[in-house]
Image: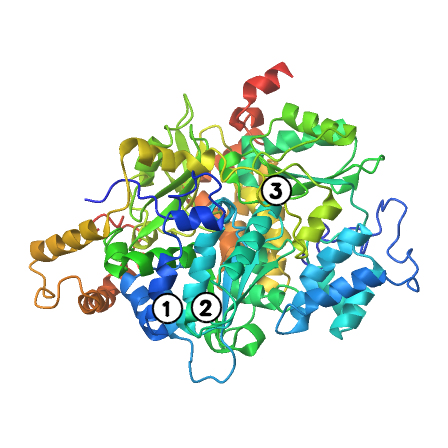
Amino acid sequence: MSPDSGAGRIPGIDDGTNAPGVSTTQIARDTPLDPTTYAELEEIAARYPQARSGLLPMLHLVQSVEGRVTARGIEACAAILGISSAEASGVATFYTMYKRRPVGDYHVGVCTNTLCAIMGGDLVFERLKDHLDIGNDETTDDGKVTLEHLECNAACDYAPVMMVNWEFMDNMTPESATQLVDDLRGGVEVHSTRGPRLCTWREAERVLAGFPDDLADEGPSAGPASLVGLNIARDQGWAAPSVDEAEEGAQEADAAEGSTTADKAEGSHEAERDEADAEVDRSEAEAKHKDNPDNTGGDDK
Amino acid sequence: MTDVLTPVLTDNWGTERSWTLAAYEDQGGYAGLRKALELAPVDVVEVVKASNLRGRGGAGFPTGMKWGFIPQDNPNPKYLVVNADESEPGTCKDIPLMMASPHTLVEGVIISSYAIRANTAFIYVRGEVLHVVRRLQRAVQEAYLAGHLGKDIHGSGYDLDLIVHVGAGAYICGEETALLDSLEGRRGQPRLRPPFPAVAGLYASPTVINNVESIASVPSILDRGAEWFSAMGTEKSKGFGIFSLSGHVTNPGQFEAPLGITLRKLIELAGGMRDGHELKFWTPGGSSTPILTAEHLDIPLDFEGVASVGSMLGTRALQIFDETTCVVRAVLRWTEFYKHESCGKCTPCREGTWWLAQTLARLEQGNGSEADLDLLLDQCDNILGRSFCALGDGATSPISSSIAHFREEYLAHLTHGGCPFDRTASTIFPKVEAHA
């Protein structure tokens, strides 16, 4: 993302390395986007109090139609928003999800941030590179699979995690990963572990642009890891206190410490606020702890 | 005495079709909204202040106080923006919440917007979670149809439009001012403060930015009361929170508990460390919070408890690593992440994260010298506190904390001429690998 970052560059725009067959200027600028797409881009801009806020979803829509961010897509966005192509392009090149090279039907991501990497994500990614015979951010010759390593995708309790067209594929192994890409290339219907059957990357980009596809009701509420704590709570009969229990607890606490708030309505907002103020007054003591790493904090906790 | 686990936000995640309006209302959903609309907006702010809810996105700033900073005499429109860009490595609580129960968030957005008198609100959700986006889109659509959103909500005279806005892959957009720039259709780069977003945020108008879990906690507070909420938790860290355990525990997952629970208890609930292994190090709240070790198993996981041992509660993203994990490899990978995600605006972060990655990589390969550890700490010193936002600060946390706790392991890379660890031992499928 950093402008001089080799790893962070949007490939094909700055480096021109092994861009398979398509340069950024190859699609003639004088062939405009089709009128339907142009109208939908305008529709996105109109959702917002200020039209420019629509630029990110507009670029998602460009990708869904064009298979990547194209020069004419950039120019359409710029024209609609009244900004220069350079400004629109500057935004497109900042974000990792925007691609300047054609993406396959299935964008296959492997999380290689620390936790997933250590749990096996590194091995999954290496196996896939071998198996598909492509490198990071490259596409198979049949145009089916684009492989990319990802940063944390917020599913760490399902590590190692892969994403296909931004759908969760949880608890992967090198074997399940190679099976997955074989199925994708072979036209076998594949389902996300916590979502619907997989659509294509272009279809996914259209949803991200704000045009829903009616698959919201597919898939489960949550995967098994999301429910571990809830299931334990149910088994043990654990729950948040009821409103009455919470009130009783507050009264007991007041009584126990011979509280100065006892003369106020018990548990009232006023009493709570006074306590909060008192806490702020006491908070200087906390600041001392920060400067004293030897204090383990066990004293008045 | 409060129970060990207190499912509130996670309570309906196991319910059939929990993401639908019907299922949510069957379990009492939107009761908080009805109660809120009977109050004046300023009184809704007071209830949230009285609950002592503190921001669940990491910083722990009191939510009600943040709302109170919105200058109501400012003639510009007010905005509420939900930060649903969950990207901090290890953090995985907001995404399952929005997947399983998007209406909890939508209800929270309506109440919170009413409180600060905003007529337009946004959920800025990261783009890399397609099914979560679908569920949010559907929930918002259902809420409009049910009259929870739109004009004159339930006859209150209050209008609200809610826009689900999808990002495009940039960790920095979880930083609130970078998020605003991104939402304005620009590169996501942090802004200098002041002015703070409360005064000049989105479109230079008064703006509140809150984390998903903070906003999702609001309906229960309005429904059950501030006293109910603050009956849970510790003296200064009230209420409940979702604790996300990942890594080398038997059953990783989400655990919703009062703030102040210990990691020892959470690991026990997760079925212990994986068989035959022991805890080596862990992050309390994502990769930007200094790592801790087994000697910190009993600190209360609240804002003060974790701060007292030199780290931060952060997002309660508890990444657990056992003795098979090379701490240098772990830290190098995080460092490469910060280098990749630095937005490039501030020199100390943009250049410094590159230096950190190079120095660390050399050490990890066994090619450096002991002096490189001091070089690293010096580089950290030149980054920490010297940039607009906390990304650079976060980049230094794993490095300085790991050198403090595991200096010997860094040196072992030098004497060993590379990493002394077997990479396959830390995976969850070492046996499968052996057969392959």
Viewer-closest of A61 and A290:
A61
The residue tagged 3 is B361
Kind of element beneath mark 2 = helix
Residue name at image x 52 percent, y 28 percent: B426
Q: Which amino acid type is marked by label 1?
A: Leu
Neighbor class of circle 1 (other Cα within 10 Å; few <14, some 14-19, many 20+) is: many
Viewer-closest of B54 and A203:
A203
Q: Which quarter of the picture shows residue A148?
A: top right
Q: Which amino acid type is marked by label 2?
A: Ile
Neighbor class of circle 2 (other Cα within 10 Å; few <14, some 14-19, many 20+) is: some
Viewer-closest of A43 and B358:
A43
**Does residue B13 show up?**
yes
Above-or-below relation of B163 to A205: below
Viewer-closest of A109 and B359:
A109
Chain of the residue where label 1 is placed in the rendered structure: B
In this picture, residue B158 sits left or right of residue A67: left
Kind of element beneath mark 1 = helix
Contact between marks 1 and 2 (CB within 8 A): the answer is yes
Contact between marks 2 and 3 (CB within 8 A): the answer is no
Q: Which mark is residue B153?
A: 2
The residue tagged 1 is B37
Task: Report the mark closest to the observer, 1 or 3.
Answer: 1
Chain of the residue where label 3 is placed in the rendered structure: B
